[in-house]
Image (cartoon, rainbow, N blue to C red):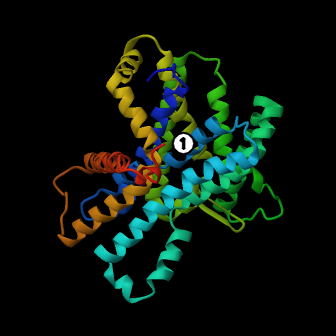
Amino acid sequence: MSETRTKKRIIYLDYLRVIAITGVLLNHISTNWIGGPFLNEFIALFYNSAGRIGVPLFLMLTGILLLNNKLPIKAFIKRRYPRVILPFVFWMGLYILYKMFVWEPSLLNGNPLQYAIVSFLSDRWYVWMILGVYLIIPIFAGFIKGTKLDGVKYFLIIWIITTALITLSKTFGFNLHYLDLVIFSGPIGFLMLGYYLHNKEIKMSPKKVIIISLLVFIILTIIKTVLLSQFLDLSYSFRYYIFTVKSHLENDTLSILQVAALFLIIKYIPMVKSGFYQKITEFCNRKRMLLLIISISQASYGIYLCHYFITYTLKNILKLHDIAFSSMPSIVLVPLLTIVVLLLAYAIILITNKVPVINKFTGYH
């Protein structure tokens, strides 16, 4: 992975975006078959715990790229909202029709219009969350412009404390209704975290940063896996549920450290100029690899939206024909299915992006 900029692209951010979409797919693949007859539950939960870094990573990348926004508020919203809404309406509309006419025609016997409306307004929580995030970015961009990294650091300290308090309140069953810190919780914290880690250089050798971060990521992923395997309902305690605001976003102390560690690994690998890490960088810097990573990165939003077609179809086919992969170890099966879904979704985005008019709605940016 290159530490240089290609035109205005920061290449390691493309690698992070590819990791993020892979994490989302890994999460969804493992979730779909947890408890299934051919999938080891602990292995599935491990991959699920690792894949949960996907959305926080996307939010960190959003913070890096948009918190230095200098556009007027109206121009910013006008530019960003169509990039999210148009692909969402396009793929969601196709998905609803696909379910109704191909796999679940019984939906047509009820009230298909009501089903479609409810689906549009309630599904794909990430899309609705990011639309809310875009509303607040101009405010925080102005804050950062005036306070620089000191302001970001101030926010992050309070965010981490708030998150710890929320985690404790969930664990021990008390509420924080009188300590109103809602502005310091939720997705905006990950935006600020991404911006801070991108712009702040750690005073430690890159090798040490990588080794420490790798250990932190692995240990925390194992801890979350063990917790989830013992208490499956605990998965909801990791999520951002406060007051009447609900989201599937991971917003606990473990998740913050986990995603920060992964971010630092990818950021600092290109800075090591010898040994194993240099070989990784050289491999990632090959022209074809760079072009592929940039292309998948640009297609990541479209991949997220259209992969539901593939996972939904795959699950129904397996169920319909009673197909199992009992001969394949779960530790191989989950990442293999994830790669297959990623490549199929990527191929769909590339093909549809070549069709005039439709290419405006594919989510390839």
| Residue occupying the point 48% across, 31% down | 214
| Residue occupying the point 28% across, 51% down | 337
Q: Position of residue 34 (x, y in %)?
A: 36, 61
| Residue occupying the point 49% across, 54% down | 227
Q: Residue furthest front?
A: 356
Which sits in the foreground, 205 or 24? 24
Which sits in the foreground, 156 or 109? 109
| Relative horizontal placement of residue 323, taking residue 271 as reference (left or right) | left
Which sits in the foreground, 168 or 205? 205
* Mark 1: few/some/many CA within 10 Å (<14, 14-19, 20+): many
Residue that carries the numbered disc 1 in the rendered image: 57
Q: Position of residue 296 (x, y in %)?
A: 40, 39
Quarter of the figure that contains the N terminus: top left
Q: Residue furthest top?
A: 274
| Residue occupying the point 47% across, 79% down | 115
Q: Position of residue 49 (x, y in %)?
A: 46, 50
Q: Position of residue 103 (x, y in %)?
A: 29, 74
Which sits in the foreground, 253 or 191? 191
Say which element carries label 1. helix
Q: Is residue 251 visible?
A: no
Q: Is residue 210 visible?
A: yes
Specify the quadrant of the image occupied by residue 176: bottom right
Q: Please say if 319 is above or below 162.
A: below
| Relative horizontal placement of residue 329, taking residue 334 as reference (left or right) | left
Please, what is the three-letter code of the amino acid marked with disc 1? Leu
Q: Residue furthest bottom?
A: 109
**Exactly how many numbered labels are in the figure?**
1
